[in-house]
Image (cartoon, grey):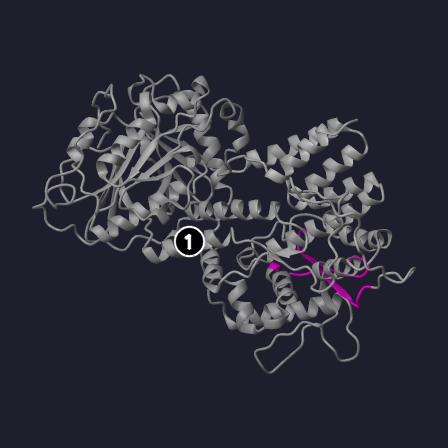
Amino acid sequence: TTPPTTTPPTSTTSMPFVSDGDERAGDVEAPQSPRAPSPIRIEYAALLAAGVLALAGVRRSQRLRGAAPRTRVPDPPPGVVTTERRLRSIDAGERSTRIDVAMRSAAQALIDTDAQIGLLLVDQDGGVELRLTAPAELTAPWSTVGSDSQSWLLPASVPVELLSAEARRVATPCVAFVQVGIANERDVFVDIEACGTFLVEAQPDQADEIVTAIAAGLASSPYAEIAQLISVSLPAAALLGHRNAHHTASIGAAFDLAASLVGSTMSNERSSFSLRSLRTGGEMWEPAVLLLTSADQVDMPTVASAFPAGGHGIGIVATIGPGAAIDAGGRIRASTDEWTLDAFGLSFALDPVGMSLDDLTAVTDLLVDAVEPVIDIAPSGTGEPSPSESAELQLLPSVTAEPTLEVPFIEAPAGEPFVAREHSIVVRLMGGVDVIDLDGTPGKFERSKTVELIAWLATHREKSTRTAARTALWELNVRDATFANVVSEARRALGRLVVPEGDEEWLERTLTERLPLHKSVVTDADLIQERLDAARLQAPAHAIDTLRPAAEMIRDMPFAGTSYLWPDAEGITSNLVLLATGVAAELAGHALSLGDIDLVFWATGRGLTVLPGHEELIGLRMRAHARAGDLAGVRQEWESYERVIVADAWSDGEPAPKLLALRRELLSAPA
């Protein structure tokens, strides 16, 4: 099957896309499609699941950047935790980066040809195979698959650094690029725009699940951030809140909208693949993708003849009845025992990705939870604001806010230093996870799961049972012997690190489900929180002495370098990020009130290591520069903040209004 070769239209007038009668697309007299095996679920499509998680992660970061000190994220519902664990249970590794660099590298050689990337297969080791829409020549390290100059292979052994020079010279060439399934343990991606028309030939319920998965894949793909996604009967939730999502009332309106959004791209002699690769005219050359379900009655032969060949700005995903003689650039077909993908001259068995309504609801709930407002946890009854909430230190003021002249701190007795709780072992979470004694000596563990178990027990003291631990640490049911060995090693390794007193053990032996960790084993987050709570009742100079050791414990992003399934899903990582930025903001606020500019930059630097672009920390740094009379420094901090928010995928790049007001205030102040 090859892409349509019709001549691009020269106008965007309305066209008759709706079929007469009540039949589905294709032949109304055709028999029912054979019922194929169920499509695979989204958590088995590594890069599709990674896209949804990345979208949730970006939304969480945006929420955390705007959060004030003394806040936390709400506990996620159990269903959300389960969904995120499902999606995290399969690791995409570095495949996403490798795909991006490989596509850009190949696009550099295809700009002045009639070929473009139509299909891509990537294995778990990073080997990439491209299927072009027409024969073309690529240079080493690409090699042909057999004697076919339409299929090219990049072995997993080739580092991406060898491709980086070519990759940097082109923009993202394939926008409507989405995972459609798995074949022979390789993820299969198709460029819907290159296909022109991509059909799903199956029973209506199965076909709709596949279309829904394709829609969600596009909506969560960083490649498709600029794509225009258009639907009619597809549930609006399937587009996951994409900025360029459009829902129309009729098929005709959908096609008219697509034509108007794409405009002259349809009639350009160059493909949009080449135009994007060349960065032509500063345009993004965004395509429009129509996503049509079995409820959308479309006269597909009319569509195929009215719209241009693949690669000219419009891609259509639609369902059809069996045996319909419709030309298409790509097609997934159902049979009684398997699915087949036909695209660009290839035909092979495929396990397509599907998303049921239940799965869609679960993913939607996850993304909604990612933007739930933070909760204020300021101690009740004290009435004292944060140091950065005073008139002089107000970071994010409203335009009409009345200044407060002083901060009513409750001063601790003079000269009384902070005394940390008694403890013997620290589980460090604010960075890479490890276990140390009071001298900083790390424990030695044979299994990584042992360290994870200790970290889990230290953060779940109220529900530290054997069943809960096994469920959290393993996505599959683990053998009793395996779990017992991990528990035993944790007990022995902690005992080797610090010998417990008397007949006590760091991990208590019980005859019940309980698996309690000794109270003298604490996390660095516990110690930081303890200091933060104490400093809130202290005068600035005293509070600085209390908070500086807390800020020194912040080394990196919480759980850095781990792939644990539970911290992000349960909101633990987000709350530790808020703890780190809260400590940094409180310490910097006190330092600014005392005129210690160097300490302001040191403290905010610790917090920005955890969460770049945090609004309150950026505001403190801008105020510190202004206090020193360095307006160039104010501008530099603003530019640093802008780079962070612009770099976010799916971000509109708009700065926080209150931070923008602060910038204007500082730069317009008289010298």
Q: Residues within 10 Å of mark 1 (few under 14, many from 20)?
A: many
Task: Relative to 469, say whether 665 is above or below.
Answer: above
**Residue 123 x, y percent position in the rendering:** 42, 42
Residue occupying the point 48% across, 50% down: 91
Image height of 143 relative to 582, above or below? above
Image spot of residue 301 (x, y percent): 15, 33
Residue 30 as seen in the image, left or right of residue 422: left
Query: Which of 584/136 is in front?
Result: 584
Q: Is residue 566 left or right of residue 604?
A: left
> Percent x, y for residue 640?
65, 33
Residue 430, can we see it? no
Question: Which quarter of the image is occupied by the C terminus?
Answer: top right
Residue extent of the magenta highlight: 420-448
Magenta: predominant secondary structure element? Answer: loop
Residue bearing the label numbered 1: 363
Q: Position of residue 429 (x, y in %)?
A: 67, 56
Q: Is residue 6 magenta?
A: no
Instruction: Please tell me whether residue 424 belongs to the stretch shown in magenta.
Output: yes
Residue 70 shown left or right of residue 206 in the figure: right
The residue lying at 10 percent from left, 49 percent from top is 31
